Image: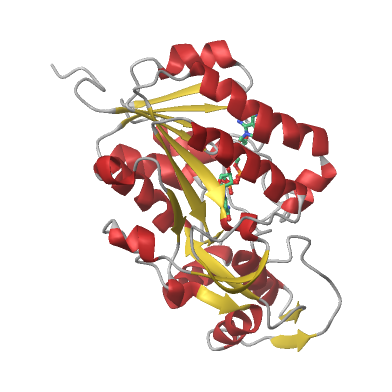
Amino acid sequence: MITPGVGKPKVVVVGGAGYVGSVLVPHLLSQNFAVTVVDNLRQGGEGMLPNFIHPDFHFVEADILESRKLKELSKGAEMVVNLAAIVGYPACKKWPEEARRTNVDGIHSLLGALEDSTRLVYFSTGSNYGEVPGICDEETPLNPLSLYGETKTQAEHLCMERQNSVALRFATAFGLSPRLRLDLMINDFTYQALVNRYLLVYERHFRRTFIHVHDMARVVSHIYHVWDRAVGMRLNVGHESLNLTKEDIARELQKKLDFHLYFADVGKDEDRRNYEVSYARIRGLGYSTVVDLDRGLGELLAGLRLVRIRNPYSNV
Ligand SMILES: NC(=O)c1ccc[n+]([C@@H]2O[C@H](COP(=O)([O-])OP(=O)(O)OC[C@H]3O[C@@H](n4cnc5c(N)ncnc54)[C@H](O)[C@@H]3O)[C@@H](O)[C@H]2O)c1
């Protein structure tokens, strides 16, 4: 008889029940990792349901601040991936104390729980760059412009003071997940165009950078396999072909769907994200994304036609 999990590298995913985690966890299970998710279920747990059938999946309801529990759970783990956070500037603005507690104190708690030999992958964000002229690479100074960016920058710094860590600075995610987020720009544009048949875009020339959630999952197993080369690095994760203006995205959507598109100066992004990013460093480690905008929009349009969304902007 084969005992579940035996011989498989153990990965603990903190905050694994959310939008990204709900895609990352099945990916890791498919790549022969034994996976333990630790999450306080702030965003619910439905995204985890398909995993319970898997003998190498474990779920523990706990808060990132419960350092003792994290210590117990991460004992013997090859890798810990931290996703737990209050995510996005609107949510951090609404719950500032919780944002500081989770995004920064939570990292102190996690770092106190880890054995030196455990690899730590920290989910950081390109939002930390702020508004940058020219092209950002990993040496570009961080200039966070919101509480979200500030707390994520502090947390990244804390993680990278540790020897055995990698920080992944992700582009903005898009795509379907069992725990859907419609506050993400491409998901939001698609949903509005589909349901309302019109879309109003502000800051149309602002350039942002995107990554499909499936590619966010893929990079984690990739980094595990190239750990000796990646350790100690901060890495932008995305692809130059997905450095796009808001107008680019809306126009691309118009090729697939009939809706009214308007441009007007009626809002602003408090992270003032208007930047272009180089992904040369992660490419140098042999990783590239596989989902382009065309495929991602096709997926969103097909999926969003099916689901009944009760609270489209649940993150805020
Ligand atoms: N989605 C993106 O575009 C994007 C881009 C760059 C980086 N990231 C980073 O990726 C990570 C995951 O983002 P997401 O989009 O899946 O967000 P999400 O809000 O869907 O997921 C966050 C998860 O963390 C959990 N959580 C929150 N507070 C917790 C606490 N105190 N203890 C334990 N668990 C807690 C939530 O319950 C949720 O399951 C975040 O760290 C985010 O900063 C996301």
* Colouring mode (rainbow / by chain / secondary structure / one colour): secondary structure
| Viewer-closest of 23 and 73 | 73
Identify which residue is drawn at 65% across, 74% down: 194
**Res 79 → quadrant:** top left
Q: Is residue 269 above or below residue 33?
A: below
Quarter occupied by the N terminus: top left
Residue 294 coordinates in the image, percent (x, y)? 45, 78
Q: Give the residue furthest to the left.
A: 1
Determine the image quadrant of residue 215: bottom left
Q: Is residue 163 above or below residue 24?
A: above
Q: Nearer the viewer, residue 248 or 25?
A: 248
Q: Between 276 and 161, which is closer to the camera in this rendering?
A: 161
Q: Position of residue 167 (x, y in %)?
A: 47, 44
> Relative to residue 79, is residue 18 drawn left or right?
right
Residue at 46% of width from left, 11% of height from top? 72
Please provide percent x and percent y for residue 290. Answer: 34, 66
